[in-house]
Image: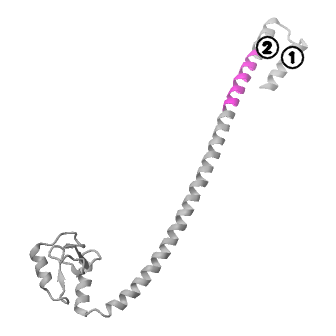
Amino acid sequence: MRQRAARDQKRLDSGAVSSPKDLENLQREIASLAKRQGDLEDVVLEVMERRESAQERVAELTERVGSVQGKIDDATARRDAALEEIDGETASVTKERGVVSGSVPAPLLSLYEKLREQQGGIGAAKLYARTCQGCRQELAITELNEIRSAAPDTVVRCENCRRILVRTSESGL
């Protein structure tokens, strides 16, 4: 467009235009080209401003992504460390369980395993302050009296959840 405007201006300046009508048309075309060029330059400036704004936003978001990625990496490292610790504890507890289960009579161990499957992993619960810690229900007085009168090596069970009750000094008996 600039080349065309320059060519038309050169033609106008050289006096090569023969008729006043051609001269008027050429001047109108030069003015029209100048207006279109101004409009296009305005569009280019607007696009450049939007591009600059978009680049600033990209930089800001890139920084935020880096920050979030750092947090993710930190959380992943903490998770992995916690899993490693849990795996270690699991191995230790499994070993201890193997030792303890060897000293428990087979029928009691069988009952415990059966209850554990039925009760979502907990086959025995502590009797604490006259409350079964498995189902969190307070035992009735008649149940407590039966448990009190039972021999220390008798297996007692909760009437509500059927788990094996472990009696301690905190049982409230």
Q: Position of residue 145 (x, y in %)?
A: 11, 79
Q: Position of residue 163 (x, y in %)?
A: 21, 78
Apparent side of residue 88 relative to residue 169 in the rendered image (left or right): right
Nearer to the camera, 86 or 170 = 170
Q: Secondary structure at mark 2?
A: helix
The residue tagged 2 is: 26
Give the residue at the far left of this rendering. 142
Magenta region: 31-46
Residue 112 falls within the magenta-colored stretch: no
Give the residue at x 82% y 26%.
Answer: 3
Q: Is residue 158 above or below residue 15?
A: below
**Which quadrant holds the N terminus?**
top right
Apparent side of residue 19 relative to residue 66 in the rendered image (left or right): right
Nearer to the camera, 107 or 171 = 171
Give the residue at x 80% y 21%.
Answer: 5
Q: Is residue 73 above or below residue 94?
A: above
Q: Secondary structure at mark 1?
A: helix
Give the residue type that dot 2 points to. Leu
Give the residue at the far right of this rendering. 14
Q: Is residue 123 above or below residue 103?
A: above
Give the residue type that dot 1 points to. Arg
Dominant SS in magenta: helix
Nearer to the camera, 13 or 111 = 111
Q: Is residue 83 above or below residue 19?
A: below
Give the residue at x 48% y 73%.
Answer: 83
Q: Which mark is residue 11?
A: 1
Badge 2: residue crowd in 10 Å (few <14, some 14–19, many ≥20): some
Q: Are the two marked residues, 1 and 2, in contact with CB atoms closer than 8 angstroms? A: yes
Apparent side of residue 58 relative to residue 9 in the rendered image (left or right): left
Residue 37 falls within the magenta-colored stretch: yes
Give the image quarter of residue 89: bottom left
